[in-house]
Amino acid sequence: MPGSLLILTGPPGAGKSTVAGLVAEDAPKPTVHLHTDSFYVWIRTGFVAPYLPEAARQNDVVLGVIAEAACGYARGGYDVVLDGVIGPWALEPFRDAAKRDALDLFYVVLRPSLEVTLARGTAREGRELTEVEPITGMHRAFAGLGELEKHVIDTTDQTIGETADAVRRRARSAPYLL
């Protein structure tokens, strides 16, 4: 029996990776956690920061590769929790691949307030994006999602554990199905 795909998205600092890891670790069936940032850091020459306009071609290629990898796991019977900045503008390769493979595709947007997003995002360490301007821009990109607004979980006042519980309870349900 095939698995399903869950895209867990939102702006940098929303808690996507931490929540995705928690959800995948205690899932009731075999589950894979795909971290989209990994697919970008594998580019060794010619990498362009994905939030820059000149990254459009790179992003199309990488998103297609991610969609195929996710569907490959799901075809093999794994549920997939995919975390990354995957806005409505980037859903087409996932929708197309899931439809082709007759897989359920769920979409959940973690969206804390801008203040919380900036506090979390700028406090990160290592190779993570911590710059205020791109984080603010990506937060803005997840505001007013129209028909996808029903896929948003406001995590402003939630702990990571509470957000993970909300995702476990609701994410793979009809309201979040694409």
Image (tube, rainbow, N blue to C red):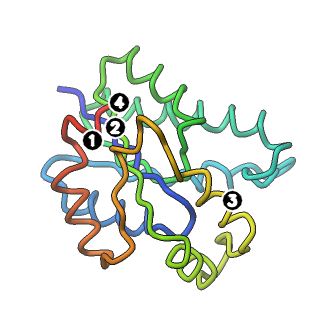
The amino acid pointed to by label 1 is Asp
Of the pair 128 and 154, the residue shown nearer to us: 154
The amino acid pointed to by label 3 is Gly
The reply to whether dot 2 and dot 3 touch (C-beta < 8 Å) is: no
Q: Name the image quarter holding residue 4.
A: top left
- Circle 3 sits on which residue? 137
Q: Give the x, y percent position of residue 176.
A: 29, 40
Quarter of the image with the C terminus in it: top left
The residue positioned 20% from the left and 35% from the top of the image is 174
Say whether residue 75 is left or right of residue 59. Answer: left
Q: Name the image quarter holding residue 26.
A: bottom left
- Circle 2 sits on which residue? 5
Q: How far apart are marks 3 and 4 (CA)?
A: 25 Å
The residue positioned 64% from the left and 71% from the top of the image is 128
Q: Give the x, y percent position of residue 120.
A: 53, 79
Establish if 49 lies above or below 149.
below
Question: Which of the two marks, 3 or 4, is nearer to us in this view?
Answer: 3
Q: Name the image quarter holding residue 110.
A: bottom left
Residue 79's tag is 1
Say whether disc 1 or disc 2 marks the residue closer to the N-terminus.
Answer: 2
Question: Which of the two marks, 2 or 3, is nearer to us in this view?
Answer: 3
Residue 178's tag is 4
Say whether disc 3 or disc 1 marks the residue closer to the N-terminus.
Answer: 1
Q: Distance between the residues labelled 2 and 3?
A: 27 Å
Q: Distance between the residues labelled 3 and 1?
A: 31 Å
> Label 4's element?
loop
Dot 4, how many residues are within 10 Å of its Cα: few (below 14), some (14-19), or many (20+)? some
Say whether residue 33 is left or right of residue 119. Answer: left
Establish if 60 lies above or below 53.
above
Q: How far apart are marks 4 and 2 (CA)?
A: 10 Å
Dot 3, how many residues are within 10 Å of its Cα: few (below 14), some (14-19), or many (20+)? few
